[in-house]
Image (cartoon, rainbow, N blue to C red):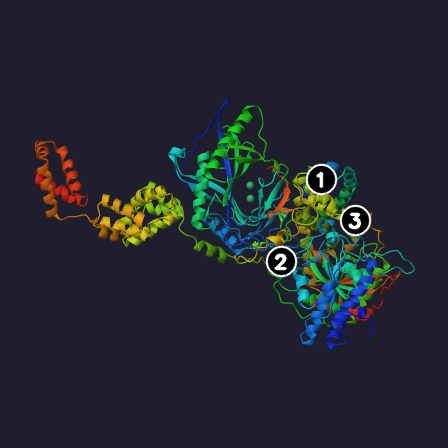
Amino acid sequence: MSDLTDFGVTALRDGFRKGDFSAREAADAFIGAMEAGRPLNAFLVETPDHAIAAAEEADRGRAVGELRALSGVPLGIKDLFCTAGYQTTAASHILEGFVPTYESTVTAKLFGAGAGMLGKLNLDQFAMGSSNETSAYGNVISPWRRAGDSAPIAPGGSSGGSSAAIAARLAPAATGTDTGGSIRQPAAFTGISGIKPTYGRCSRWGIVAFASSLDQAGAMARDVRDCAILLEAMSGFDAKDATSLDVAVPRWEANLSSNLNGKKVGIPKEYRVDGMPAEIEALWERGIGFLRDAGAEIVDVSLPHTRQALPAYYIIAPAEASSNLARYDGVRYGLRVLPDGANLQDMYAATRAEGFGPEVKRRILIGTYVLSAGFYDAYYTKAQKVRALIARDFEAAWASCDLLLTPTAPSAAFALGEKTADPIAMYLNDVFTVPASLAGLPAMSVPGGLDAQGLPLGLQIIGKPLDEQSVLDAGLAIEERAGFSARAETWW
Amino acid sequence: MPDGVAASRATMSVDAHTVRRIASLARIAVTDGEVEAMVPEFNNILGWIEQLSEVDTDGVAPLAAVIPNSLRLRDDIVTDGDRRDEVLKNAPQAEHGFFAVPKVIE
Amino acid sequence: MVSGDVTMAQAASTYRIQGATGEWEVVIGLEVHAQITSNAKLFSGASTTFGAEPNANVSLVDAAMPGMLPVPNAECIRQAVRTGLALGAEIHRWSRFDRKNYFYADLPQGYQISQLYHPLVGEGSLVIEADEKAGIPTPKTIGIERLHVEQDAGKLIHDQHPTRSYVDLNRSGVALMEIVSRPDMRSPAEAGAYVRKLRSILRYVGSCDGNMEEGSMRADVNVSVRRPGEPFGTRTETKNVNSVRFVMAAIEHEANRQVDVIEGGGAIVQETRLFDPDKGVTRSMRSKEDAHDYRYFPDPDLLPLELSEAFVEECRAGLPELPDAKRARYEGVLGLTPYAAGVLTADVAVARWFEALLAATGKDGAEVAKAASNWLISDLFGALNRLGKSIDESPVSPAQGAELLGLVADGTLSGSLAKQVFEIMLETGDDPARIVEERGLKQTTDTGAIEAVIAEVLAANAEKVAEYRGGKDKLFGFFVGQTMKAMAGKANPGVVNDLLKKALG
Ligand SMILES: [Mg+2]
Ligand SMILES: [Zn+2]
């Protein structure tokens, strides 16, 4: 029997159902890979007990003919999801030692569907970053390397632990969260698939908040079908989240079809930013060809406010974060720093100074500034108006197309440390992913090929609100044609 | 305020004093060194997000809900509470069923 | 209604502070925080019951655990809308919750969910009654600027440990209405009357129990002073004053303090102050010193609150008769004196009791209202004061009261007998008819019996009879008294009078 860690969600689920192997065997295989993969620093906490317990329950269930959607499938969980009984830190010192007594809605759904948890995955601190270099517990190292070069490569961020673990076959799939591209960009950097659903599809209850109006959980896996299976299990209305959408979850997997006859795919001209690397241009052209070949009609569209999306995002997200992160004050949980003779307010300042990393502080301060007296309208209100215009741009585009195709990121993965000096250069990584986030639209990244140095490149598909199906279908069409089979070989 | 005014307000650049004030509003202790480093960084980022002022947003309502959706209300039923141990479980300092903090003078 | 735009001619308050350099006028605005009556909190399912064990009524949402989210309580919104309607205010069909950001140990989220930019309720007003003695010569309309819904904070306990404060989050997240008045009040008495009237309206509506002892109602008192006719001065805000008496005392002290400061060449700083009930003074509040930049912005965890026309109309239709209308009806339809109408309508519990009493008489209200209100205000209130009981704890029920009034009306009981019977009712809780029966307290109109007693009385007082017949008419009362005494008060006074006149010729 071939190495079970070569199996994705579909293969594990189906093989387990057929009886080719036990859930326990699958769990043990990935637990072994997880332990062997420690040099990648993808996991903050390993939870083999959880994976094994779920596997044994699945095996007992199978014996009595009881099979659930994810029976036999172990998963990695981004450490932004609160997990009952398992430390949850959002990769920040300020939550060190915090063990939730509650289970996030999304992880509860996954575990209820029979999945087990291999461990809590590393990420950019509070999901603020695009390279996983802001974690308080060390960088995640991508399994990928440039041809003939052993320089450690960024797995993307903020879901970098998730992307690295899947690309390195330490987990068949993982949860991610996406605020401005945190699922799609790391997926693109590591040659895997990742989908952020429509805002409101997945409950935010129990997910450590970064920017409430943008945060959305999603699925990361080796291929499109695996994403569909995982997303189906994660999604659904939750009365505990006032922004949750009260709509039925479609049967995305069952309805998957790479036949795009009758579909119109828009190509937004504003995404052709000056200085776009030739190989990104080429990738995009290749993607257009794939979709045309799958039966789609290609049309040119315009999203005039694309250029303002990033600056609007870097007002709105930090503003919301500055308020969402005010609860980390050393009173009820996590780190407390109490210098001698310090009063309450001194304790707050000391705790937060020591507990938050530099990027988190940077964003809290920017957010505090743009909301402060006299600047609220100039910055926050203005940004929300621009956001409304960006949403209108998409609305208008839907009049002439059903989907949009763009590159996921302006470049392939960069080396660790390459962009840390200049925050704005780092922020520019999200230039293609942020607009869909601001408009709450479903969007996914699928591998499109490799760059000259042998690093993966991703293509992004953006869909209409609630039309994840078309996004997944187009993703599948690209997947079938790109024939992306490259994988990072094991150097760790 | 009209966007024109908004823009001019926003273009004021930030100095060390402002950074200190913002840091204290955010309850993050900062060293002089950190403040020094933050001033140019702050102005860089603010200058960059400045491009928004180019966009004409007169008569545009700020986005209220990303995806059309209405605020659902709960029924007035007691469904929670009575879990003090859970509430205090992660507290750095809890005494006699309370969270404890340095003495506050009101 | 906008402040100043008034329904009747209003005489300006003559309240002034006599400073060393002349007269000062006081300008007062109140922000009243009223706890909305609900089972569960505004954004969580935890209970609102008062006096629970520390941190027992706390959900993970109230403790602001990571990833917790608010979901609004429909009843709290409904009660706030009903209250707005009762204040004649506009109900905003589109409103929104905002975050007020500041750091304090009683505020777990690091922000309070409130409403700044788009409150649920807009401008309204209420009328305070005239009160000559209190220097309120005519009824006065006080403008209400807005009413919004927000979360209460937790409680800090400072006296349990020498170097630590303890945090109890039981109140954290409890629903409040903040009702903001216009700066329309000009004396402590007007402010006191405003709080009493607002409390009365809230209790009629049922949106707040008005229990100030348990903190269900607190006022932030905004005070400034100025030379009569000059523009407003700088104001201070004295927070969380929790009784009508303290509101008046706080204004009294704060206004005088401000006059002293200004006349002493100083200037008033806009600041948050605290009232010390024991010393009767206000002092600056250190903990709120730098909390002036709240960075309000719409709460991204919550969508805008949109109300349908139907919902608002349903709230309007469900409103009870309010104090002003009830008072007018008591004076008009029931023909009560303004005083009686005022006393009976001030508190909803009293009005309910009174109306139950009228109903129980089975007679037309107008016919029995006067007797009923006299008995309730003098006899029942007198007894309740003696017993230290509230109207809801009255040992005598409205039905029993009505029965007693009936016995007086049909001549079974004289006024004095009725008082005797009432005392027995208070002790035994028995029905008046039964008491009359068992104790034979029925008054007699049996002329034969009365004539016999009169004969004895006259015989026993021959010389007084002579004096009377000699023209000393004043003695008539003496004979009445003697006769009544001899009959243990049970004789019908009218009959006694007639027969005495006859007997004395
Ligand atoms: Mg106030
Ligand atoms: Zn308030």
Q: Is residue B3 above or below residue C40?
A: above
Where residue A27 sits, quadrant-wise, is bottom right
> Which is more toward the observer, C340 or C438?
C438
Same chain assignment for discs 1 and 3:
yes
**Three-letter amino acid code of the residue under disc 3:** Ile
Label whose residue precedes the other's in the sequence (1 or 2): 2
Helix or strand or loop: what does disc 1 sit on?
loop
Label whose residue precedes the other's in the sequence (1 or 3): 1
Mark 3 and mark 2: Cα distance apart in space = 31 Å
Where residue A215 sits, quadrant-wise, is bottom right
The residue carrying pointer 1 sits among few (fewer than 14), some (14 to 19) or many (20 or more) residues within 10 Å by Cα, namely few
> Which is more toward the observer, A103 or C458?
C458
Picture coordinates of residue A115, whole percent (x, y): 71, 67
Q: Is residue C179 above or below residue A299?
A: above
Q: Which residue in the structure is indicated by mark 1?
A: A339
Q: Which residue in the structure is indicated by mark 2?
A: A243
- Left or right for C197, reference A177: left
> What residue is shown at x 67% (from left), y 68% (from top)?
A113
Quarter of the figure that contains the C terminus of chain C: top left
Instruction: Tell which quarter ligand 2 is in.
Output: top right
Q: Is residue C70 above or below residue C482?
A: below
Q: Nearer the viewer, mark 3 or mark 2?
A: 2
The residue carrying pointer 3 sits among few (fewer than 14), some (14 to 19) or many (20 or more) residues within 10 Å by Cα, namely some
